[in-house]
Amino acid sequence: MKQQLLLLLIYLVCPAESKLYQNAITKNTKVIDRQWVGFRFSEETNWGGWLVRVRSGGANTFSCCGAYYSPLLVISSANCISPFRYQLDDASVVSTANADDEDFSFSPVYSVYTPHDFVPQKTNLDIAIVRLSMPLKGKMTEFIKLASMQPAAGTSFSTFGWGYDSLEVQPPSDEPRKTIVQQFDIDRCKKLFPKGFVSNTVLCAKFPQDSFECIYDGGSPIVWNNELVGIASVGATCKNTTNPGIYTSIIKMKPYIFEIHKGVRSGQLSRNKRQIRAQWQSQISL
């Protein structure tokens, strides 16, 4: 009994370590075997191995946030990625959770898929599926599950980013930051923006009142119940937090994500078969 109490005390005093996986991710790794299970005690700056950075150039560049969904696929914002669509040769995806004995894991970008009807600077269908040349191999790298249901208005979400879209408020951080936002009624949200701007593939979230707590990098993920609920789109800034942030709803875009995932796994989206050019904006019908 005393030994059990001692073990319990050690567990409470010493935070649990983040999960380390024995095997590296391969193209055949089952997503369900490596999915993020939620926040752990020691994760002060590491909130899961699924959070990644999409770089358009060298080591010091930052373009978009991303969520690692499967061995070769990362989910981000088409609006964020579009300006860099002709720089694919230098583009890469970098992990953010790494064990003490390893460097950052990264992969060159193989291709990027966006819905055929997506229009830059619009919110409709704002999603980009980034295809990696090889899996991210870090010991702490893992996948995030897609949302299984649409949360109700008022639900609190966690969102992540570095603050690169908030330069007018404060400098970006070296490490990813986390903050809380709240689901905002979609009908009220539509009235706060020009008519037609808030599309049917959007969910809105209320920013923190304090601009210094605001995070809205392109592709910034929001999670709820350990699942990916949305990704930051366009239309709001951290300089003015009175208007809600606009996010692409993962629930609305799941059929498209599944289509791309199936196409990659089956080989139907092979660059040779589809003649996909080495550029950011590959057009795939929804």
Image: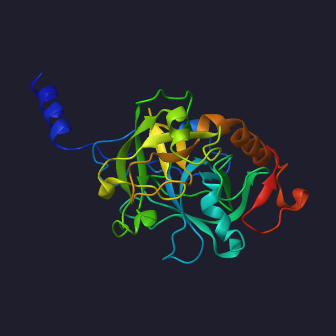
Q: Nearer the viewer, residue 147 or 41?
A: 147
- Residue 26 in sight: no
What's the image's color scheme?
A: rainbow
Q: Residue at x 39, y 45 (%)?
A: 19
Q: Kindly identify the residue that appears in the image at 57 percent across and 58 percent down.
A: 136
- Image quadrant containing the N terminus: top left
In this rendering, the answer to whether 6 lies above or below 71 is: above
Q: Residue at x 62, y 56 (%)?
A: 135
In the rendering, at what x and y percent does residue 236 appear?
A: 49, 54
- Where is residue 74 shown, x and y percent of the image? 61, 52
Left or right of 84 in this view: 190: left
Residue at position x 73%, y 41% in the image: 256
Q: Position of residue 43 (x, y in %)?
A: 32, 49
Figure quadrant of residue 240? bottom left
Exactly how many numbered labels are in the figure?
0
- 122 w.r.t. 182: above or below: below
- Which residue is outermost to the top? 1
